[in-house]
Image: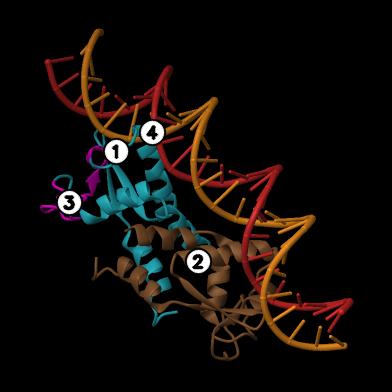
Chain colours: A brown, B cyan, C red, D orange
Amino acid sequence: MEEIILILKALADPTRLEVFQCIRGCGGSAGYDIGTGMCDGGTEGGVAVCDVKCKVPCAPSTLTHHLNVLRDAGLIETQKRGRVVYACVRAEAIQKIAAFFAPETK
Amino acid sequence: MEEIILILKALADPTRLEVFQCIRGCGGSAGYDIGTGMCDGGTEGGVAVCDVKCKVPCAPSTLTHHLNVLRDAGLIETQKRGRVVYACVRAEAIQKIAAFFAPETK
DNA sequence: TTAACATTTCTAGTATTGTCGAACTGATTA
DNA sequence: TAATCAGTTCGACAATACTAGAAATGTTAA
């Protein structure tokens, strides 16, 4: 339950949800469109944080903060390659929160 | 998306989630047990707010506030009968948030 | 080696929010 | 009618959280 709260809190902020959707909606690092939620095909290994920053208007330090919250909630994983950090969604977290809301499960 | 944020915000508070689970977990007005999340069979028409108050330790004004937040998010409906207010979950809200997290839908 | 880039850490300010007490309204009971 | 019960409204306080600027770290390019 503690875990559910963490996930809900992490996603309950508009900016952070946008960041999450950006990471979730696009496996690659280019072509993601917030309006449609679509992207033109992703590369492997997650979304580059610098690309998220282009889509979500906020200070770098703010973005780092939001990514930390999402990571602490178990919603994303990050990986550094060179000077770029790539982020991707943790499927287990999605499954957990989906199960919480699924009418047949609960 | 605005609606999703409202729902997430409403449930992202421990006390409020407990209130929600209490209403959700028990269609009736008696026998709900927070520990197990079970109840001994519900009566029709939702859960009495006074019974929720017995299970969730907080001031009456606090409970009213939380119920308002849940109602504004579309998560519950309330109905006054006599001097007792009954609350029940809105299935549409659950479906909406469930769809948001369901891996096949999004 | 120097410069530019991506990201983080630290700090601080502002805004939001959870909580409650006191007073009040409406409904039931004695 | 008076008293009690279920909730609400209002106001205030403390805690949390979002945000960003400045400075620092590590990496790549010139």
Viewport quadrant of the C terminus of chain A: bottom left
Please state the chain letter of the residue tagged with numbered disc 3 in the rendered image.
B
Spatial distance from mark 3 to mark 1, Cα to Cα?
A: 24 Å
Secondary element at image label 1: loop
Amino acid at circle 1 = Pro
Spatial distance from mark 1 to mark 2, Cα to Cα?
A: 30 Å
Numbered label tally: 4
| Residue B102 in which image quadrant | bottom left
Please state the chain letter of the residue tagged with numbered disc 2 in the rendered image.
A
* Residue picked out by circle 3: B44
Please state the chain letter of the residue tagged with numbered disc 4 in the rendered image.
B
Crowding near pointer 1: few (<14 within 10 Å), some, many (20+)? few
Spatial distance from mark 3 to mark 4, Cα to Cα?
A: 26 Å
Secondary element at image label 2: helix
Q: Which residue is found at the position 35% from the left and 39% from the top? A: B63
Q: Nearer the viewer, mark 3 or mark 4?
A: 4
Proximity of marks 1 and 4: CB atoms separated by less than 8 Å: no
* Residue picked out by circle 4: B61
Q: Which mark is residue A70?
A: 2
Amino acid at circle 3 = Glu
In the image, B104: left or right of B2?
Answer: left
Bounds of the magenta segment = B31-54
Proximity of marks 3 and 2: CB atoms separated by less than 8 Å: no
Residue A15 in the image: above or below residue B71: below
Residue A91 in the image: above or below residue B65: below
Where residue A22 appears, as percent x and y from the top left, is 57, 75
B56 falls in the magenta region = no
Mark 3 vs 4, N-terminal side: 3
Q: Which residue is found at the position 10% from the left and 52% from the top? A: B40
